[in-house]
Amino acid sequence: MKNMDILDRMPWLAKDAVFQRLASIAEVAALSKEERREYDESLRKFRDTISVMEGQFLEGEEKGKAEAEAKARQEKQESARKMKAKGFSDDDIVEIIGITPEELKAL
């Protein structure tokens, strides 16, 4: 009885989702052995594909981040070189650009 009370209080869309899920479970339960094997195989392939796609996304995200960091580092170095050529002091360059004195000396 308690579960029915919960169902009665649920909004219509939530009830619809519950019944859709129950229908899906019932459909799978009604499959023959061969159909169930095929269903399980297709579900495994689907999950494998999603896993590969997520891995590729994360790999691309890491690569993009590394490229952005390298570009930012190059831009800082170029700005430091220009400031040095304009006569800025090493202390000012380090403070403004945000690089270490060692990085500035390496330029």
Image (cartoon, helix red, strand yellow):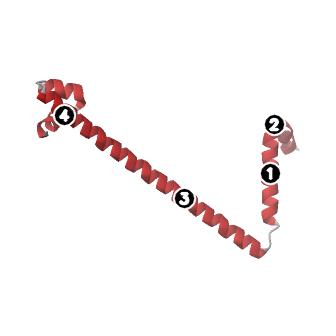
**Which dot marks residue 11?**
2
- Give the tally of numbered discs: 4
Do the residues under discs 4 and 1 have CB atoms within 8 angstroms?
Answer: no
Alpha carbon of mark 3 to alpha carbon of mark 2: how far? 33 Å
Q: CA distance from mark 1 to mark 3?
A: 25 Å
Dot 4 falls on a residue whose secondary structure is loop
Label 2 sits on a secondary structure element that is loop
Q: Is residue 48 above or below residue 8?
A: below
Residue at the image position 80 percent from the left and 73 percent from the top? 32
Quarter holding the N terminus is top right
The residue lying at 17 percent from left, 27 percent from top is 93
Mark 3 vs mark 2: in front? 3
Quick check: 87 left or right of 42?
left
> For residue 100, which numbered disc appears in the image?
4
Q: Position of residue 90 (x, y in %)?
A: 12, 27
Q: Amino acid at mark 3?
A: Ser
Relative horizontal placement of residue 64, taking residue 44 as reference (left or right): left
Q: CA distance from mark 4 to mark 2?
A: 59 Å
Q: CA distance from mark 4 to mark 1?
A: 61 Å
Bin the neighbour count of mark 2 within 10 Å (Cα to Cα): few under 14, some 14-19, many 20 and up. Answer: few
